């Protein structure tokens, strides 16, 4: 049900192992960001982000595997 037992009165975000957050990312209290997920710079995280997800600056939630394909397509012209 998304409830996490805690002895603390206040709770910040719970960020999974190897998750990456860009500059100026903000999180609401109690938000969970899953392991191996990426959140783009400037995004405000207001809800649960699953494991191995990529959240774009415009709020799209895509699997990491697809995100890496998009990055490869963007950088092919740079090679």
Image (cartoon, rainbow, N blue to C red):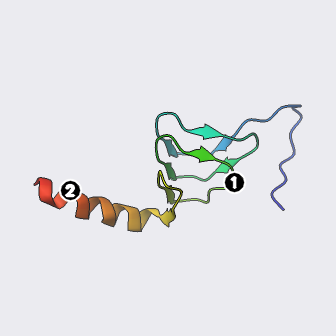
Residue position marked by numbered label 1 in the rendering: 47
Quadrant of the frame with the N terminus: bottom right
Q: Position of residue 47 (x, y in %)?
A: 69, 54
Position of 26 relative to 31 (above/below): above
Reading the chain from its start, which is encountered first: label 1 or label 2? 1
User: With respect to residue 26, does 74 lie above or below?
Assistant: below
The residue singled out by tag 2 in the image is 75
| Percent x, y of residue 2 | 80, 57
Q: In the depicted view, which residue is nearer to us: 74 or 33?
A: 74
Coordinates of residue 31 in the picture (x, y in percent): 71, 47
Residue at horizontal 47%, vertical 50%? 57
Label 1 and label 2: CA atoms lie apart by 30 Å
* Residue at x 49%, y 55% (from the top left corner): 58
Among all residues in the image, which is located at the extreme front?
Answer: 58
53 or 25, which lies in front?
25
Q: Residue at x 52, y 59 (%)?
A: 52
Q: Would you call the spot at circle 1 few (<14 residues within 10 Å), some (14-19), or many (20 or more)?
A: few
Q: Secondary structure at mark 1?
A: loop
Q: Is residue 79 left or right of residue 70?
A: left
Q: Are marks 1 and 2 in contact (CB under 8 Å)?
A: no
Badge 2 element: helix
66 to the left or right of 30? left
Q: On the rendered structure, is 27 left or right of 69?
A: right
Quarter of the figure with residue 73: bottom left
What is the quadrant of the C terminus in the image? Answer: bottom left
């Amino acid at each position: 049900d998304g409830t996490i037992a805690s002895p603390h009165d206040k709770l910040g975000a719970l960020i999974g192992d190897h998750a990456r957050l860009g500059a100026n990312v903000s999180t609401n209290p109690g938000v969970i960001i899953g392991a191996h997920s990426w959140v783009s710079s400037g995004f405000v995280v207001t809800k649960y982000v699953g494991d191995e997800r990529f959240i774009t600056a415009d709020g799209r939630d895509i699997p990491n595997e697809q995100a890496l394909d998009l990055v490869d397509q963007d950088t092919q012209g740079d090679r």
